[in-house]
Image (spheres, grey):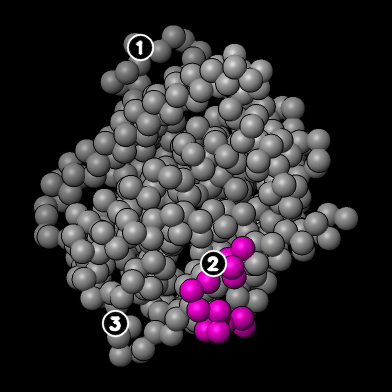
Amino acid sequence: MKYLIAIIGLLVVLALAWVASKDRKRIKYKPIILMIGIQLVLSYVLLNTRFGLVIIKAIAAVFDKLLAYAGSGVDFVFGGIANKGQAPFFLSVLLPIVFISVLIGIFQYFKILPLFMRGIGLLLSKVNGMGKLESYNAVASAMVGQSEVFITVKKQLDKLPEHRLYTLCASAMSTVSMSIVGAYMTMIEPKYVVTAIVINLFGGFIISSIINPYEVDEKEDILEIQDEHKQSFFEMLGEYILDGFKVAIIVGAMLIGFVALIAAINNVFDLVFGISFQEILGYIFAPFAFLMGIPGSEIVKAGGIMATKLVTNEFVAMMSLTDIANGLSSRTVGIISIFLVSFANFSSIGIIAGAVKGLSEKQGNTVARFGLKLLYGATLVSFLSAVIVSFIL
């Protein structure tokens, strides 16, 4: 039965993308089928095999170590604030972003990260039927973040037609930044974080290939990656430390605002209608949760978390999942965890449009115009990843 629901869910996701397609005659189905197959294989390997378990444990161990190193710095500065035995969210989850940001800066400075991103991007372009720039951008988005990635391709931004710009932005919204992966791993199981990052990479190409199909002229597909202005090593360290701290502060501020707002709205709805706002959203998203393979008794709760992610952000939704995880089946927790690992929410439209506008006024306005279509596609990527995993769990 679960396979039948998963197949129906997969067909629904593809149909929803097909309905929004701007040129259905140009959709290339062979790369799409190939990438869906790759998603299924990778999900099975990462979640259901000993080899996958070893990989996940190794990655989780690396991030555990990084978080421990980050904790040394946090304890030195803020150690007296927390009560013994307690770990405030800002100190234990958000501030370690600063240290991971520094590591990304070091790998960037020594050209290790750009080399890796180019190599993986080139391999991906052979599979997805898209251009080298699109493939590089998808990998780079997962490494350096949805706003920072556009700096690396700023030489080409003004030259890009709208259809290629859409694919670049869709990749940025469908992935997550490596700097906050450690934060996610403190809230949901590392195996789901790693699996979601890997299959979202292909999911972004699948949905974009349907919604936004096009051919790339090889003469136009020149990958020019912008090197940052030459800095000394310690200048770079200072910049990435401050960037990491800004991210932590921004995420913290957004959490304060969104969590407080959701609490207020829930209370108002409860007083007026006798049901919380999240429960109403849960009923709206329940059919999608069912198609993702979640048991009928849990679809309303799961739908509420899915909706919370869309209207707020993934951190708020992960906190909601953590609060009710004990009352859900392990299958439901796994599927919802996969759905949550992306930047597909309303605030990301502003973040991406702002990042592009800072580099190109004209292209920033273009991104703002297709912002809702961008969010629609990125949400379908999350939906697709959850359906793929429902075959495996």
Q: How crowded is mark 3: few (under 14 residues within 10 Å), some or many (20 or more)?
A: few
Q: Residue furthest right?
A: 1
Give the camera-side residue of 81 and 297: 297
Can you give x and y, in whole percent of width and height, for residue 136 in the image?
Answer: 38, 70
Residue at the spot of label 1? 81
* Residue appearing at x 64%, y 32% in the figure: 280
Q: Is residue 375 left or right of 276 when viewed as pictured?
A: left
Q: In this view, does 388 lie above or below 242?
A: below
* Residue appearing at x 19%, y 54% in the figure: 358
Question: Which element is circle 2 on?
Answer: loop
Residue at the spot of label 3? 222
Can you give x and y, in whole percent of width and height, for residue 22 in the image?
Answer: 48, 74
Front disc: 1 or 2: 2
Quarter of the view holding residue 298 = top right
Q: In this view, does 225 lie above or below 24?
A: above
Q: Is residue 220 left or right of 182 when viewed as pictured?
A: left
**Residue segment shown in magenta:** 16-31
Front disc: 2 or 3: 2
Can you give x and y, in whole percent of width and height, for residue 47 in the image?
Answer: 69, 53
* First in residue order: circle 3 vs circle 1: 1
Q: Is residue 105 magenta?
A: no
* Residue appearing at x 31%, y 38% in the figure: 247
